Amino acid sequence: MIGQETFADALLDGAKEVFETMMFMTVEPCDEAGHVIGGSALLGSITFTGDIEGCLTVCCSYDCAKTIAVNMLGAEDEELSEDEVVDAVGEVANMLLGSLKSRIAETAGEIQVSIPSVVSGTELVNSLGEGAAEISQVVNIDEETARFTLLYRDAKV
Amino acid sequence: MAKSLLVVDDSATMRKIITRTIRKADLSVEDEILEAGDGSEALEKLEGNSVDIVLCDINMPGMDGRTFVKEARQIPSNANTKIIMISTESADEVIDGVKADGANGYVTKPFTPETIQKELAPFME
């Protein structure tokens, strides 16, 4: 199994690349392990299979998602539909896994990814069952807070 | 002469981002940029419209981008249509594979406006 530190660094570096390139937003790690996004939240999720399998999620409040969508689309708040806000979170999960994948390709081998999906609710968490490693990174994105979680396990187990 | 474009992505948000990026770039494109949500819809749009350049995602539900390129290249009327893939996939095997299937260019997400402009520029003349 690949070291968690390797994945954690790659996840954060990938997030910085995605947010700075596509949304002109800065991502800074926030030392709040176990932090649960409060209130109404969105959870973007994308699964992957290969030598390792698992899923990557992006969880943030609806307001944070709206800020991301505004920056991503270069739109005004009032111009955005709810679908566009939801879609933006799915795209972030998609691009984040793409950036992570390119950073861990040499050690993790080939990975096939799914289509991203997004759910809304409160106190959202994801699970891959027993035997899965978890890397969770709470970050500040400009003035907002989000949580990136990577769950993975060796596919041969 | 302005070029006609078709943007193919299952994400309406990503289609909007790509369209906005093209509009902001100093490129001569037609006012209406066509859109499709997957490969099948893109093939239908190609059949009914004259399209110079297609910008296409790879990982889509329904017909994916790789299948779309193969299918599009089987149709003689698309011979001069340039197809540029836009995907989070960055592995050389994927990029080489899709180019072997008939794609003319490749942009990796996340992308800057400059990357899109640079990739499109050779096909705008």
Image: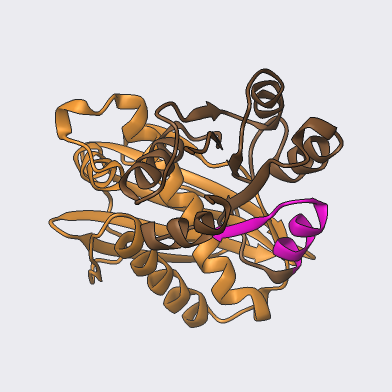
Chain colours: A orange, B brown
Residue B56 at what x, y percent from top left? 60, 43
A59 lies above or below A13: above
Q: Nearer the viewer, residue A18 or B118?
A: B118
Q: Image check: B98 left or right of B111?
A: right
For the point 44% across and 69% down, the residue is: A11
Magenta-highlighted residues: B93-108
A7 lies above or below A57: below
Residue B72 at what x, y percent from top left? 78, 36
Q: Image check: B88 left or right of A5?
A: right
**Tally of marks:** 0
A50 lies above or below B44: below
Is residue A108 visible in the rendered image? The answer is yes
Q: Nearer the viewer, residue B68 or A86?
A: B68
Residue at the limit of the structure toward the top, as seen here: B48
Which of the 4 image quadrants contains residue B42?
A: top right
Q: Nearer the viewer, residue A131 or A136?
A: A136
Q: Image check: A15 left or right of A111?
A: left
Q: Nearer the viewer, residue A20 or A82?
A: A20
Is-magenta flag for residue B99?
Answer: yes
Which of the 4 image quadrants contains residue B52?
A: top right
Residue B65 at what x, y percent from top left? 69, 42
Residue B18 at what x, y percent from top left? 43, 43
Residue at the limit of the structure toward the front, as seen here: B1
